[in-house]
Amino acid sequence: MDFKTAADALEDRRGICMLTTGSMELDKLLEGGIESGSITEFFGEFRTGKTQICHTLCITCQLAVSDGGAEGKAMYIDTEGSFRPKRLEEIAERFGVDPAVALENVAYARAHNSEHQMELLRMAAAIMSQDRYALLIVDSATALYRTDYSGRGELSERQMSMAQFLRQLTRLAEEFGVAVVITNQVVANPDGMSFAKDSTKPIGGNIIAHASTTRLRLRKGRGDNRICTVFDSPTLPEADAQFAISAKGVCDATE
């Protein structure tokens, strides 16, 4: 790995795929969709649509590049038991993909503790070297670290362990060019003013903040609508977009 010119780097970036989220407004906010080769983090309270976005991406990554896909398979590491193959069937039908084929193209694993979660990444690397994968999802990246390490005494150990996991994720994104999508939970922010419009913050501190290329905050809107805000990104301006959650995955907001 030597130095290269910015012109070469630009040429490399032309090979990046953008995965559609299923919502035109959300894709517009993300300037095309979820970027391959980097880590995108969705964080928000429960019921803000984090897992629904993950399920939708499992199908859209299989679409042709011209349709907003990457013609690759998806890998799903589930730490909270929220993976539902039935949802994938419904979403596949909406995008005109044969549900049986779509499900065959999603590799799924349930992680039971943070060590197991790390082990699954090693297995993921072995599988990715043999097949064309476009997407790796970890839903949620932080939940098991919260339960495995409790109290302030174990905080530094937790952060170190989480940093190693995220480092490995970054490597997979760069080595195999997959889009890595992680979800994260939020906690009450004691520094935040209670009258501020959002008094929560994502957990994991600076370690997750530096590992994630793009950080997106999700919050509830009216009815089935959700609001996505660009919280941190090297290229995207801070802005909002509305989308909705339907039986067939993520779609455009309903009035």
Image (spheres, grey):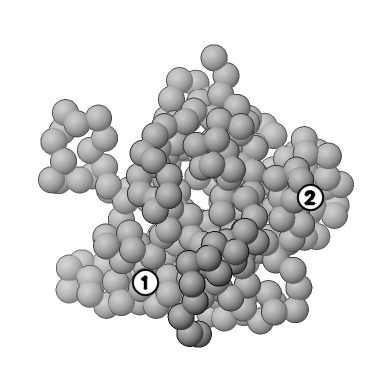
Q: Secondary structure at mark 1?
A: helix
- Name the residue rendered at 62%, 59% in the picture: 14
Q: Amino acid at mark 1?
A: Met
Question: Which residue is situated farthest in the top direction here?
Answer: 255
- Name the residue rendered at 23%, 44% in the picture: 188
Can you identify the residue that label 1 sits on? 162
Image mark for residue 33: none
> Is residue 73 among the parts visible in the rendering?
yes
> Is residue 137 among the parts visible in the rendering?
no
Crowd rating for badge 1 (residues with CA inside 10 Å; few <14, some 14–19, many 20+): many
Q: Amino acid at mark 2?
A: Ala
Crowd rating for badge 2 (residues with CA inside 10 Å; few <14, some 14–19, many 20+): few
Q: Is residue 243 above or below residue 99?
A: above
Image side of residue 139 versus residue 15, left or right? left
Q: Is residue 89 above or below residue 35?
A: above
Q: Earlier in the sequence, mark 2 or mark 1?
A: 2
Which quarter of the rendering shows the C terminus? top right
Q: Secondary structure at mark 2?
A: loop
Residue situated in front as seen by the camera: 222 or 1? 1
Asked which quadrant contains residue 86, the reply is top right
Residue situated in front as seen by the camera: 21 or 81? 21
Image location (x, y in percent) of residue 118: 49, 76
Residue situated in front as seen by the camera: 210 or 51? 210
In the image, which is nearer the foreground, mark 2 or mark 1?
2
- Name the residue rendered at 32%, 51% in the picture: 202
Can you identify the residue that label 2 sits on? 64
Disc 2 to disc 1, C-alpha distance: 34 Å
- Name the residue rendered at 73%, 40% in the picture: 91
Image location (x, y in percent) of residue 47: 46, 37
Image location (x, y in percent) of residue 43: 40, 47
Q: Is residue 174 above or below residue 50?
A: below
